[in-house]
Image: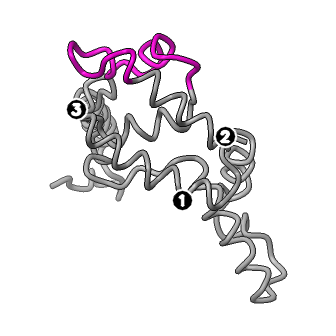
Amino acid sequence: MAQANGTGNVPSSLPGAVAASAAASATAAARDEDAAQLRLGVMEGEEVLMISEAAALLAKREADHAKLGHTYSLDVVNGLFRPAATYCARFDRIQNKTAVLAVRDTFDGRGAELGLHPFEVAQLVNLMPADAEEAKAIIPSLREEGKIDNDVLNGLLMELTTFAK
């Protein structure tokens, strides 16, 4: 435990040690995370949301906020609300609520049948690549030998486009 150095201050070596410890922890966490290997670090095992689902949740939160008669901005509570909502609105590919639910139902089941990780399914939905080649270029975990056949992946992507706006 650090002792005061007689001036009431913590020794100057302690902040350096804390910074070094934080840097070592960040480096260790980075080694534990690799989306290409589906090592998601602290997010492993958590539910993965599609951007369309996040957009719907944020819109509901904003509507509930207004319904309660609050006059302050949600950004006062959380400075990330508006940037997150703007991002979701910009990249939301499936805006119809019924279609969002259908995509979740369809692709959770189909993805599991095909051996896809929920993270991969969410990335396919969020990015909507044009074909298997593009999908494997932008989602490295799909490149794994024997992971998914290009024809099967192309069929899945064609099915996905039927839900897009």
Q: Mark 1 Cα within 10 Å, few/some/many (few <14, many 20+)?
A: some
The residue nearer to you, when weighing 94 against 65, is 94
Across the whole image, how many numbered discs are drawn on residues?
A: 3
Q: Which residue was labeled with disc 1?
A: 101
83 with respect to 118 (left or right): right
The residue pinned by badge 2 equals 164
**Kind of residue indicated by mark 2:** Ala
Q: Amino acid at mark 3?
A: Asp
Q: Nearer the viewer, mark 1 or mark 3?
A: 1
Which quadrant of the view contains residue 77? Answer: bottom right
- The answer to if 44 sits in the magenta stretch is no
> Quadrant location of the N terminus?
bottom left
Could you say whether the residue bearing mark 1 is in a helix, strand or loop?
A: helix
**Image coordinates for residue 10, horizontal then vertical, percent:** 32, 51
Name the image quarter holding residue 150: top left
Q: Which residues are magenta?
A: 129-152
Q: Look at mark 3 in the image and give the residue it sits on.
A: 32
* Helix, strand or loop status at disc 2: loop
Q: Position of residue 67 (x, y in %)?
A: 78, 85
Assess disc 3: are there few (<14), some (14-19) or many (≥20) residues with their C-alpha within 10 Å of its C-alpha.
few
* For marks 3 and 2 on the same chain, the one whose residue lies earlier in the sequence: 3
Residue pictured at 36% horizontal, 55% vertical = 47
Is residue 141 inside the magenta stretch?
yes
Cβ–Cβ below 8 Å for labels 1 and 2? no
Q: Earlier in the sequence, mark 1 or mark 2?
A: 1
Q: 74 or 17: which is nearer to us?
A: 74
Local SS, label 3? helix
For residue 150, side relative to residue 97 (left or right) = left
Say which label, 1 or 3, has the lower sequence index: 3
